[in-house]
């Protein structure tokens, strides 16, 4: 069993990783400043001797150094997400996502951490129109957020080459699932739409609804983090991977699925109309990942496609939001 640091461990993805690795018998340390994470996401682990919470900020070198003491693996999830948030406040996004990332890299290097696995982003593909997206072909970033996530990859590569650190980046594609927050100005589309439908309110689709995404259920993301952490294949480290399903769904199709699954709990939801608004600045029209590299080098195989994931997610929201 290993000692794992999960930065942002009280957030959506981080808390799911925390739960999984504790269930596997590992020791887990969570570093979180609760800017976007929630205490209730990790409250069930209080009293677990294998769990430790450090309330701190990755922008603090001291907090980073404290968090990596005795750590075998870092799963770096802490970041300020959201393209619109980065457009509104690029400075804070940069401070957290670039300076904070560099602090964690340096602290991990100095502490002799075995491997540094970090949340990269499909936004790195930028204006590249190639489909499916393959890891070695990217375009120019379309938002401050995308710039920060690409800079993360560059820093990780330099630390691998210069200091001999083992790093693996996971380019997340539109992750969704249990504990994804439906509240706040920058809520992701799936929990936001679910909440709207449950309240019999009309969700707003940006544009005509024909934009498509490779929506990726949280269990697929957990699998990728675990495989990245445990691989002993030397060809599989010091690189980046698409973390996705390899399929795409339009926003109109997504709404159809959500209505289908939610009406099993409340037939009135079928009558809720959808509203269309303008396209959102910084959005790319289509996103579809190739997961061949992850299959070949990590043995990754997605367990949930969009419908299966949405069924599980809708049930979780119904049980927890009602």
Image: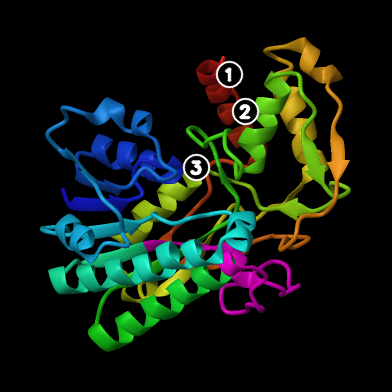
* Circle 3: element type: helix
Q: Earlier in the sequence, mark 3 or mark 2?
A: 3
For the residue pair 141 and 1, the one nearer the viewer reads as 141
Whole-Å distance between the Cαs marked 1 and 3? 17 Å
Q: Earlier in the sequence, mark 2 or mark 1?
A: 2
* Residue 224 location (% of width, % of height): 43, 54
* Circle 1: element type: helix
| Direction from residue 160 to residue 242 in the image, left or right | right
* Residue 302 location (% of width, % of height): 53, 48
Q: Which residue is mark 1?
A: 318
The span picked out in magenta is 118-145
| Direction from residue 156 to residue 120 in the image, left or right | right
Q: Earlier in the sequence, mark 1 or mark 3?
A: 3
Q: Residue at x 53, y 35 (%)?
A: 181
* Residue 44 location (% of width, % of height): 28, 26
Asked if residue 133 lies in the magenta stretch, the reply is yes
Q: Residue at x 16, y 30 (%)?
A: 48
- Name the mark on residue 311: 2
Q: Residue at x 65, y 34 (%)?
A: 192
- Name the mark on residue 256: none
Quarter of the view holding residue 118: bottom left
For the residue pair 222 and 193, the one nearer the viewer reads as 193
Q: Is residue 169 visible?
A: yes
- Name the mark on residue 218: 3
Is most of the magenta stretch helix, strand or loop? loop
Q: Quadrant of the C terminus?
A: top right
Asked if residue 26 lies in the magenta stretch, the reply is no
């Amino acid at each position: 069993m290993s000692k794992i640091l999960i930065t942002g461990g009280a957030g959506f993805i981080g808390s799911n990783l925390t739960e999984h690795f504790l269930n596997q018998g590992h020791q887990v340390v969570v570093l979180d400043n609760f800017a976007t994470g929630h205490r209730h996401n990790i409250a069930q682990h209080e009293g677990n001797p294998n769990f430790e919470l450090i309330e701190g900020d990755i922008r603090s070198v001291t907090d980073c150094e404290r968090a990596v003491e005795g750590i075998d693996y870092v799963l770096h999830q802490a970041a300020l997400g959201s393209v619109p948030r980065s457009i509104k406040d690029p400075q804070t996004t940069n401070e957290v996502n670039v300076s904070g990332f560099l602090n964690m890299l340096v602290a991990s290097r100095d502490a002799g951490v075995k491997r540094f696995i970090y949340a990269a982003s499909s936004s790195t593909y930028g204006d590249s129109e190639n489909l499916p997206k393959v890891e070695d072909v990217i375009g120019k970033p379309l938002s401050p957020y995308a710039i920060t996530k690409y800079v993360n990859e560059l820093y990780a590569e330099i630390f691998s080459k210069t200091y001999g650190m083992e790093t693996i980046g996971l380019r997340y594609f539109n992750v969704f699932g249990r504990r994804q927050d439906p509240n706040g100005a920058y809520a992701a589309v799936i929990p936001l739409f679910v909440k709207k439908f449950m309240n019999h309110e009309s969700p707003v689709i940006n544009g005509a609804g024909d934009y498509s995404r490779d929506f990726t259920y949280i269990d697929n993301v957990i699998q990728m983090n675990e495989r990245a952490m445990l691989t002993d294949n030397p060809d599989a480290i010091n690189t980046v991977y698409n973390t996705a399903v390899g399929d795409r769904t339009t926003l109109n199709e997504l709404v159809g699925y959500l209505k289908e699954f939610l009406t099993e709990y409340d037939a009135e939801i079928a009558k809720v109309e959808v509203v269309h608004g303008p396209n959102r600045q910084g959005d790319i029209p289509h996103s579809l990942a190739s997961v061949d590299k992850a299959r070949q080098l990590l043995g990754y195989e997605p367990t949930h496609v969009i419908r299966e994931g949405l069924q599980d997610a809708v049930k979780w929201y119904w049980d927890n939001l009602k």
